[in-house]
Amino acid sequence: MSIKIQLPMGTKHTDEELAFIREMGVSFSNLNVMPDEATYENVMAVMERYAKYDIAVSDLACPPLQKNASIILGKPNRDVEIDKFIDFIELAAKVKVPIVSVAWQPNGIFRTGVAARPHTRGGRSAYADLKEIEARPVSNDREYGMEEIWGNFHYFLEKVIPVCEENGVRLALHPNDPPVKSLGGVASLIYNTETYRKAFALAKESPALGMKLCVGCWLEGGNQFGNLMQDIRTFCEQDKVLVVHFRNVSSTLPYFEETLSEDGYANMYEIMKQFVACGYQGYMSIDHAFKGYPEMGGMLGACAYPTGHMKGLLHAAEIETRWQNKV
Ligand SMILES: [Mn+2]
């Protein structure tokens, strides 16, 4: 058993794209399903087609439910949206995919832009300047404070965790990105190790709530987020890590660029070795790639090099760890 490499995928890949993914030796996909496609028949048809290319679905996400402003901000229609979330969990169970994505980000990820910056070798990549982000007006009708946001999360957990437990489905909770206390006037749920612990405690330590351990977010926050190496060990030991986002950045906040794995400030080989040493056997993806070029495979083409680099680091880490264990 080894760490399982995955790619974020949609439902409409061409045969050529699926063949390209198979050639990379990537056997798992984090499948994004839009609400109008979220039926048993549709998802099964996609999974059966992908299976012909030896690609299994490791986790499901429905983007409008994954980051749902009505649920997160406690809007009057939140029960309707939570019911849709519950339907999606039941769908995941029916198609035998045991992980569903969630991120408590009503306004998505905050970045200043996507451009070629000093650390990206001319590639167009996302970057964040906290000064610019903090100067923006509120993103919603008003500001939402910490207690209210946690209250809404608690309300969601009480309805959804029992359904997850009954169906054998686990939620993979991603941090708020960038990991700061509030974004666009909305208090962030997860911006450090302590807030993850608080979330797990609120779910009464149910195995139904796990995490997407986004190395990128940890690195953006640096020590403000937590001790990455120690957190990898602790959360692996507690079986909380369902998916890893293996991503590097140029520096910690207040300014960072999303870089190639080998160009950021962190030593990604040491990080990979820590996952291997901790016996992590779940899923791992590059999270984000550069913008790519339309005539060179677009986003999928842009994912190929960093995915290959990540596989190389995994391969080397496994050999080195095995060798060390023998001596
Ligand atoms: Mn991430």
Image: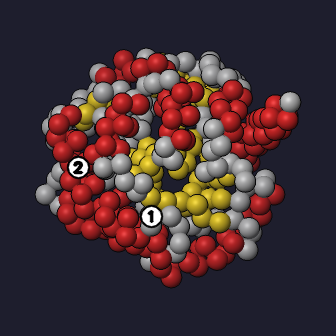
The answer to whether 195 is drawn above or below residue 219 in the figure is below
Q: Residue at x 28, y 45 (%)?
A: 202
Q: Quadrant of residue 162?
A: bottom left
Q: Is residue 303 visible?
A: no
**Residue 187 as seen in the image, left or right of residue 11:** left
Residue that mark 2 sits on: 154
Q: Nearer the viewer, residue 116 or 184?
A: 184
Of 163 and 95, the residue lying toward us: 163
The residue under the point 27% across, 68% down is 83
Q: Residues within 10 Å of mark 1 (few under 14, many from 20)?
A: many
Check disc 2 and give the amino acid type: His
- The quarter of the rendered structure image containing the N terminus is bottom right
Q: Tell me if residue 236 can be seen.
A: yes
Q: Amino acid at mark 1?
A: Val
Asked if the residue at label 1 sits under 8 Å from ligand 1, the reply is: no
- Could you tell whether 88 is left or right of 276 in the image? left
Q: Which residue position holds label 1?
A: 169
Q: Quadrant of residue 86?
A: bottom left
Q: Is mark 2 within 8 Å of ligand 1?
A: no
Q: Tell whether 247 sits left or right of 255.
A: right
Disc 2 or 1, which lies upstream in sequence? 2
Counting from the top left corner in percent of width and height, residue 169 is at 44, 64
Residue, far front: 327
Question: In this orientation, which residue lies closer to the viewer: 163 or 297?
Answer: 163
Residue located farthest toward the bottom when viewing the structure as drawn: 41
Q: Are marks 2 and 1 in contact (CB under 8 Å)?
A: no
Q: Which corner quadrant of the image does residue 134 belong to?
A: top left
The residue lying at 42 percent from left, 54 percent from top is: 207
Q: CA distance from mark 2 to mark 1?
A: 18 Å
Q: Secondary structure at mark 2?
A: helix
